Amino acid sequence: EFAALGDDALAARLAPDVPGVTLGAFLNTDLVGLLTLVREAAPPLAHRVNVYGVSVAPPARGQGVGAALVQAGVELARSWAGVTSLHLAVMDSQPAALRLYERAGFRVWGTQPDAVRRDGRVYTEHWLSLDLTAPA
């Protein structure tokens, strides 16, 4: 999906009126990765931050870009007052992403079968969380 994003789509994702914070990873001057953090707005949920749109361009994979983005996202979320947990979902078609999140300390707490249907395929989605109150 990252490789298919055009300049207009990237600009829209990074626009100042879009909720959350998007982190970018660069190799030389090329944008090669993105990660977006969105804090829940409702007061009973404001301790939660959701991680969305984590992506690394195919030529940059295997170079630690994803791990650096996740680490930077975790550190940023830890700095926000009152935030105690990060949450994300990953499809079963992305085992490398699942391993990346688990290495960063995320744990699967639930699995949703038949979560996404795309191009005639059915995907299961794993839901993960990271407890930010635990020692880093």
Image (tube, rainbow, N blue to C red):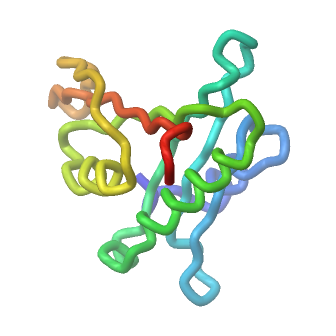
Q: Is residue 118 toward the left or the right of residue 30 in the image?
A: left
Residue 60, picture quadrant:
bottom left
Q: Looking at the image, is 109 positioned above or below residue 10?
A: above
x then y, percent, for residue 50: 55, 33
Q: Residue at x 54, y 40 (%)?
A: 132
Q: Residue at x 45, y 72 (%)?
A: 65
In the image shown, does 128 or 7 lie closer to the viewer?
A: 128
Q: Is residue 43 toward the left or the right of residue 59 in the image?
A: right
Q: Is residue 14 toward the left or the right of residue 64 in the image?
A: right
Q: Looking at the image, is 4 positioned above or below residue 127?
A: below
x then y, percent, for residue 117: 25, 25
Q: Looking at the image, is 135 positioned above or below residue 130?
A: below
Q: Looking at the image, is 135 positioned above or below residue 48?
A: below
Q: Residue at x 54, y 33 (%)?
A: 85
x then y, percent, for residue 134: 49, 41
Farthest residue, direction bottom: 28
Q: Residue at x 16, y 26 (%)?
A: 122
Q: Is residue 100 toward the left or the right of residue 88 in the image?
A: left
Farthest residue, direction front: 135
x then y, percent, for residue 115: 27, 20
Residue 111, picture quadrant:
top left
In the image shown, does 55 or 40 lie closer to the viewer?
A: 40
Residue 66, picture quadrant:
bottom left
> How many marks do you count on the picture?
0
